[in-house]
Amino acid sequence: MLTKRVTDPKKILEIEQIIEDIQACLATRTYETGSGLYSGLTGQLLFQWQLKKYKASFVDEGNFSALLEKVQLESQTQQDISLAWGLSGYSWFLELLLSELEDQPYDPEVNRDFEGYLLHQLSASQWNGDNEVVLGLAGISVFARRRFANNGGGFLYPKVIKTLLEQSVQTPQGLSWSTPVHSVFRVDKQAATEFNLGLAHGVASSIVTLTHALPVLEEQLPQIKGALESSIDWLLSQKNQPECISCFGYRAGQEANTRLAWCYGDVSTALTLVKAALQLNNQELLSQAKTIAIASTNRRAGEAGVEDAGICHGSAGLYLIYLRLWELLQVPELLEAAHYWLDQTLMFYREKGLAGFDSYVPEENAFISQPGLLEGYSGIGLCLLVALGIDEGWDDCLLLS
């Protein structure tokens, strides 16, 4: 019988060996990545922090401290405020770290200046940046949400959500969020609007952000519920025709068969809708979301478009998302899918060692070694630690919890 954690002793030993190899690689190989959460040193710190919970001897305390100090120094001259590459990601990690330290109480002063800076930026002028999670408001909300929870309140989180609501666009199908013309994620610069559907860069990230905000901010911002319901209506109106392999494409008005992934596609969209349905107590929506989730489990390695093991669009990310879906729905097919993608992740390693975890870059048609959280070794290691039971909610930085 399948269980949430891996229980087979041989598989546990195999995963432990892989995690040791990842840690050894990160400790000895130099990468020019910057300090960001998604691709840089902060993501590596997150992996090491979780690894210490499993087996402290796997992590050199001196190296961890030196790496943290390096990131702290780089943050002092950092101008980027995004979650993926900037100060929101680093500050989010500090909030996680400070809330979990056993030998000292949480210190609310640590991120006070950055919190005030963000609040000033959002209050002083109209937001003209992205709305999505990588560079935009949904990403900033990840830090603001954790900060709000740790402090028992605050002004930043409500301001971020209010700003996100103000950025929405009313359409005949419901509320949505257009990708700004100047965004690096915008494809058609000539069109009046462009609506991205994905969790990484699109409307799904706004829906998850409102879902997370609803139970704690509805009293302050009663418009959240209506906006959430309307944006779900909009997203469901964008479904592909039944004959398509996938339920959702990449952008509104474009029928395309998306791969299974965190960044785009049916499985992350299904999780988005399941979480919203449960929060809204909407059984009809929950039924639709469950159908999408279960249908996606029929797509395995050949049909899923999976080329590598990373979180963003690889097997480890699918393992994590299907596990989260199973936790919410308790449907056996979802747990079976989670274990299938865990096994695929292990297969990448069995075939090529750590090189099997290299990230596929389609623009170069090549596999590249990357250390980071989103597409590299640190993220894969974090997912493998989940399989071993180290499952505290770090994946809120991916909008998964």
Image: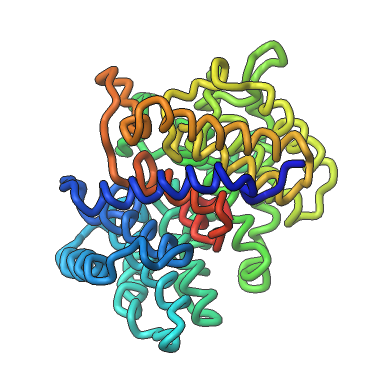
Q: Residue furthest right?
A: 283
Q: Extreme front residue here?
A: 10
Q: Give the color scheme: rainbow, by chain, secondary structure or one colour.
A: rainbow
In the image, residue 85 lies at what x, y percent? 29, 52
**Residue 244 percent across, percent down from the top left:** 65, 14
**Left or right of residue 294: residue 174:** left
The reply to whether residue 145 is in sight is: yes
Question: In the picture, which quadrant includes the C terminus?
Answer: bottom right
- The residue lying at 50 percent from left, 78 percent from top is 150
Q: Residue at x 62, y 69 (%)?
A: 217
Q: Is residue 55 above or below residue 36?
A: below
Q: Nearer the viewer, residue 152 or 343?
A: 343
Would you place residue 106 above or below residue 162 in this image? below
Q: Image check: 155 left or right of 294?
A: left
Q: Residue at x 32, y 21 (%)?
A: 362
Q: Quadrant of residue 63?
A: bottom left
The number of discs equals: 0
Residue 256 in percent (x, y) is at: 54, 17
Above or below, 30 relative to 103: above
